[in-house]
Structures are given as structure tokens and as C-alpha cells.
Amino acid sequence: MRRRDFALLALATPAVARAQAAERWDLPTGFIDSNFHTQTLRGFCEDVAQRSGGKLDIRLHPNNSLLAFAGIRRAVQQGQVQAGESLLSLHGNEDPILEADAIPYLAVGYDQAMTLYRAQRPFVDARFAQIGLRLLYAVPWPGQGLYTKAPVTTLADLRGMRMRTPTPASTRLAELIGAVPTMVQSGEVAQAFATNVVTGMMTSAPTGIDTQAWEFARYFYTADSWHPKNGVMVNARAFDRLDPAVKTAVLEAAAAAELRGWAASQASDVAAKQRLVAQGMQVLPVPPALDAEFKAASRQIAATWAARAGEPGATVIRAMGG
């Protein structure tokens, strides 16, 4: 080979390498590896790599290892990371439609949760488009319940209880029933109970497993009254820069992940409740008197939310038969 040919090859090699190199994204989440949401995310990342022919490499960062969970959505919006997972209802104060799935008793069980999601999704997509985000998929948590140290039968047992409430809607529910709402991240729950920062919490059975609830609570009351969703989102500019074929790969992988995630949520609920019992906890339905009081408070929350949410809220309420 002549010297000139070597020179041309040297110039061409970096360009070939760049063409072959995979685009790399970072995707943080706040949940541990064994959580079904994280497992669904890991499958999504692997699926994207396969469907894109290796052209997009999404690196998953679980358990707040890259960013604290509460800051993930803003980091995606600002382009600090290309993608991330956040609880949609965590941002209900900025737009009420984002917390439609956190209104207690608006959607009970997975079938109703899906009906709500179908009504809510177009408005979430529109909101995200306004702020430079794109929702790829959303997966619900199992129905929320109540963890306590002592048994409860009526609302009087909850008055004054320092209750961990992860969303604005659950905070309002705690206030209406006379509890003291307290914001504690899932990774800090055990310490918060140990120091009596909280003495009860509203969350799902799988979160009880993640936090080893049996070490600080004796009772789990299964209200199954709402299914807040985690949303996996992408920075819109980062998505728009992808080649068309890679965009298709991402969207197809997202659709598949959503189906797997909803099924995994239901399976995780059953398995988590079984494990709580095996660890010595009592898993019980909400006592009838307390359930009636919860529902009365929830009707106030739903009415207030609908007034704030305007026509999008009215559309969701109509879809739920209201």
C-alpha cells in the first residue's frame, strides 16, 4: 500500500469508528435492582439495544446511584441525563392531570387503573411536550395500603399519626383524616420509623419488601384503592436526534416494556403480600368503618382535584363513570 493510501485510511478510520459507535444514554431510577419497576427497566434497556442493532446503549442507574429520585424528572427535562423514571403523581402540584392516578378510590384495581391511564395519557403527553419531555411508558404500583405498628379500626386510631405520604394527594388524604403527613424517601423509611419520624405509611406491598417493613411495622391493611404510576421519560431533544430506525426501536421496546410491567406489577403484589405474611406481618383488609371514612375523605379530594384539573380532569372523571 502506498503512503498516500495509508494517509487516507488513517483519516477514514475515526469516521468509521464514530459511525459504528453506539449512542449512549443514562437512565436513573430510585428503586433497587430487585424491584419489579427496575427489572422492567432493565429489560427495556436490553430490548432497545437489540432492536436498534446496538446503535443505542441505555445505561441503567438504579437505587438513586446517579441521581436522587425526587430530582430525576427535572434532570431529564434539563438534559443532564437523556432518560429517567419518576413517579408521575410526584409532580401533581405543577399540573393536576399528573396525579389523576393518585386520587384515592378513583380507580380501584388494575382494570380501572388501565381505564384511567387511557383517559389520562393524552393529557400527560401534551403536558410533557410543553416542557421538553416525552413519556415512553408508564407502569402502575400495586394498590396502596396502610402500614402501622399497632392495629387500627377507625379514623380515631390514625389521628396524630406521623404518616409517610409520598405524593401531594396522599398528603391531602392524611390531613383530612387527622394524620400528620411526612415526606420520606423510600430508602429512608426504616430509619424514619426507628426514630419515630414516622409511625405509619401509605404505600404498596412491594415497597414494604424493599424497605423490610416487618422490621418496623406489624400490620399492612390492603386498601388497594389507587395505583400511582411510574413514568419512564426521555428528553425530547435527545429523542429527536436519534435516527428514525432507532426511534422506532425505542418506541417498540417501550410498548413491550409497558405490557410486561403491568403484568409484573400484579405478580409482584401477590408475591409481596405472601412474603410479608411469611415475615410475620398481618396482612388484612381495611376495617369496614375505616374504609368508609377513607372513602368519605377521598370524595372531598376527588372533588377538589376535579376543580383544579379543569376539562382534562372532567374527561378522566367521565371515563371512570363519574
Image: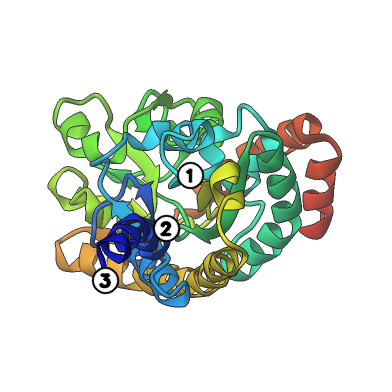
Residue 65: give x, y in percent of width and height: 23, 41
Residue at 57% from the left image edge and 50% from the top image edge: 241
Residue in view at x 31 percent, y 54 percent: 60
CA distance for labels 2 and 1: 21 Å
The image quarter containing residue 70 is top left
What amino acid is labelled 1 in the image?
Answer: Leu
Q: Is residue 203 visible?
A: yes
Q: Which mark is residue 97?
A: none
- Residue 307 x/y as whole percent: 80, 31
Query: Which residue is denoted by mark 3 in the rendering?
Result: 274
Left or right? Give the position of 114 relative to 260.
right
| Count of all numbered marks drawn on residues in the image | 3
317 or 196: nearer the viewer: 317
The reply, left or right, for residue 47 in relation to residue 62 is right
Q: Position of residue 110 (x, y in %)?
A: 57, 68
Q: Quadrant of residue 49?
A: bottom left
Indicate left or right for 320 with 100 as reference.
Answer: right
Report the front residue among 94 and 143: 94
In whole angstroms, how far apart are the C-alphas of marks 1 and 3?
25 Å
Determine which of the numbered discs, if any, sits on residue 87 in the image: 1
Q: Residues within 10 Å of mark 2 (few under 14, many from 20)?
A: many
Q: Nearer the viewer, mark 1 or mark 3?
A: 1
| Mark closer to the chain start, 3 or 2 | 2
> Looking at the picture, which amino acid does disc 3 mark?
Gln
**Is there a contact, CB below 8 Å, between mark 2 and mark 1?**
no
Q: CA distance from mark 3 to mark 2?
A: 13 Å
Sort mark 3 into few (<14), some (14-19) or many (20+) by Cα contacts within 10 Å: some
Give the labeled residue for mark 2: 222
Q: Quadrant of the N terminus?
A: bottom left
Q: Callout 2, which amino acid? A: Thr
